[in-house]
Amino acid sequence: MNKYFRYIILFLLIFPPIIFFTDLTRNPYFFQIFLLNVVILILWILYLVDALMKKSFKWSWSPIELPLVVFTGFAVFTWLYAYFSNQPYLIKQIIEDGKNLPGFGINYLYSSIFSEGFKKFIFTLVNLLMAYWIPAMLIPIMYERQERAKFFNTIINTLFFVGFVAAFYGVLQYMEIEPVWPKALNPFGGRPVSTFGNPNFMSSYLVMLFPIILMTYLSQISAAKKILFLGMLEIYFCSIVATMTRSSWVGLFTAFTVIGLFLLKDYRKEKSKSIFAREKKWIIAITIVIIVTFLTWPRSLGGSTPISRITEIENVANTSYGPMHQRIMIWSCAWLMVKDDPILGKGWGLFELYYPFYQGKSLFNDLYRGFRTHANNAHDEILEYWSQIGTLGVAFYLWFLVSFFAYGIYLYKNTFLESKRLIFIGILSGTAGMFLDNIFGNVSTQFCVPAFLYWWNMGTLVGMDDTRKIKEYRLNSVSKGIFAVLIVFFFFLIFKWYNFFLGEINYFQGFKMSKKGDVAAAIPYLEKAHFNNKEVNSEYELANCYARLGQRDKSLWAYYNALSANCGYDEIHFNLATVYAQMGDMEKALNNYTQALYINPISQEGYFALGNIFLINIDKDPDRAIALLERAVFFFPNNIDFWNNLGFAYTKKNDNKKAAEAYRRAVEINPEFQMARHNLEVASQKAGIKSEPILEYDRLVKAAEQKINEKNWPEVLKLCKQLVEISPNSYKARFYLANAFFTLGKVDEAINEYKQAVTISPSNLPSWVNLGLAYSQKNDKENARSAFQKVLELDPKNQIAQERLNYLR
């Protein structure tokens, strides 16, 4: 049996990290997740079957098992507590409507909690505990001490090889060389994804392996082997730099710091016999290689170098900077979750579900509004756990980590074989690096392959402790029953993963057909995906396809299934509301539009849809229309329809002064909006407003156009200056004024006004043509070329632009 275990373990380490498909599932790394989970489950099924056949099993406890089991057990408890406790919800009637819907009939909120939490439960059981216990428990009980040491050495070298393959592939991608797929994979702006599908996952994986390779490099006696490992370290480091993942750079620096502290302590104790004294020139060599590589690394396709990637953080103080401010928004939402449930948190695995309900408050801040996201994770290791499993859960997690590092230091101090001590240093520093990587914004501890290595490495450190006692336990009838139940449960999980995988394949096929417009052909695939696994994206896409074909009852059922998978998506409620509106059920439509806007208060479509319902019944309740439209113009101050509708709502409440203000804003934004102009005139009269300069706009435009026909350009200039003063956003006013300046020989003033005109109306051809002519008049060839090239973008056959560009060459 040991031989089979050995082959399965090596298969587990080699293939999941490096096999991926780009057109099979939505995420290229989903196959890796499927394969890794299934192989781990098969391995433990074989162990349990072997134990039943032998009527006994072996186990070996370590000092860190208790905090680990307490931490994971408590995490699962918080999920179950969330599922069975009363949960607040804005509009509970939507839940009741789902319970009464034929073919559905469940509480989608609690179904969401179960769905999201169950996925995290599987992750915790398989990707964390079972992965950790393979090197920590299974390998020590499989082999005697010498064979165990050899196998751990094989495992470490295998991981080095896998990391090298991924790192080398990543460097090739950075250099725009794609040896595997027909076209280059570049979804992250020049940052390589290698076999991981995400640069941040690869960088974390390599950060955990780099210190172990570094320690192995220092332990080599042969200079040839040292040079070989130096080359491997260079490839690893190049790939880490190429990902441009700054949090991983922090993690790697942390690993270097931990290594430095160990070597310093060793130097103070051993002096000339220390590792540092003996390997000084090789330490200097790798240090020089790292520094030179970092400073001279070529610019990426996205335009970044390592230095510029660091210095661009200065933008945080001056402007809205996505990588930082989006994370700040996510962290603030995570903190709000902590404040709401400080002891137990929101529940293990439920961050993604609850996050959208907290994000809305942040979107009222201009700084964060452009960074709305559907966050899967907190992007901070402490907040990740704190928000989900509360203060107690974080305490248990930190208890485990402190116990692990204390245990590792104990093993380091009490191990006499230097090469083994160096491996302990590598594992401890790599784990510290991974932790800091995830403190500073990465989320790799929550994703399958890098998380697997995180827990595997910790298990390896435990498994290499040869002082632990291995005990054998006889199986009685009760324990046999428990083992049999576990075997059945693990087979059930394999079946679940098989269906997860098929569901992803069917969803992606249906999704691609739907996006091509072949909705009828997409539905069978999406229906299969539904029966494979109720996943929010596939259920939502199925509902959309039903809705597009007019199958409204089926679409309602599918939208509710999407909500039962994850009810944190405003799009589901919006589309559900739209279907209800089409069916004439305005009350249910209103409820769902309201819920959609609660989740996403910056949905322009949501304000239009709900606003139309309110306006239909405005005579009964103008206040709610006013409240909604006031928020709409807060988020969309340049939307003329919102301002016009707000003016109408104020009119219905006989507040003509505010109505006039709203209509005025609409006209200021678009002076050609005749309805708002008429409404402004009527409201101003009712409000007793005697002078409304913007109402002079039509008269001044007509007068200016008459003077243009008469070629009276000084008078045109005078009239257009008045137009710009009362309506600075008027394209006509700017364009006519620019023409007047140009005709009168004031080219600089003309250029400024043409630039204003194309800013107001970027696709307006005459302004671009005249701007190019004005630049040509000044002999500004570069700007003239840019303007005429823009003309050809808008009108490829434009003769004036073609002739001018030929002349300017």
Image (cartoon, helix red, strand yellow):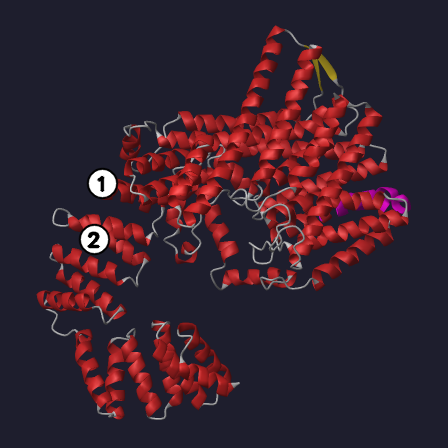
Query: Where does the image place residue 600, in percent across and percent down from the top left?
Result: 36, 48
Q: Which amino acid, mark 2?
A: Ile
Seen in the picture, residue 137 relative to 791 is either above or below; the reply is: above
| Frontmost residue, 555 versus 344 | 555
- Residue 286, by quadrant, is bottom right
Query: Where does label 2 land, which residue?
Result: 626
Is most of the magenta stretch helix, strand or loop? helix
State the quadrant of the N terminus. Answer: top right
Q: 427 left or right of 570?
A: right
- Dot 1: within a 10 Å radius of its alpha carbon, few (fewer than 14), some, or many (20 or more) residues? few
User: Does any portion of residue 267 appear in the rendered image?
Assistant: no
Instruction: Give the label on residue 458, or none.
Output: none
The residue stretch that appears in magenta: 257-275
Please say whether residue 274 is one of the residues in the magenta stretch. Answer: yes
- Dot 2: within a 10 Å radius of its alpha carbon, few (fewer than 14), some, or many (20 or more) residues? many
Looking at the rendered image, the disc whose residue lies closer to the viewer, 1 or 2, is 1
User: What separation in Å lies between label 1 and label 2 (alpha carbons)?
Assistant: 26 Å
- Residue occupying the point 12% across, 65% down: 683
Q: Which amino acid, mark 1?
A: Met
Q: 99 left or right of 778?
A: left
Q: 385 left or right of 575?
A: right
- Residue 706, by quadrant, is bottom left
| Frontmost residue, 503 versus 51 | 503
Query: Where does label 1 land, which residue?
Result: 583
| Frontmost residue, 253 versus 233 | 233
| Frontmost residue, 796 versus 535 | 796
Query: Where does the image place residue 437, in percent across and percent down from the top left?
Result: 62, 46
Query: Where does the image place residue 374, in percent across and percent down from the top left?
Result: 44, 46
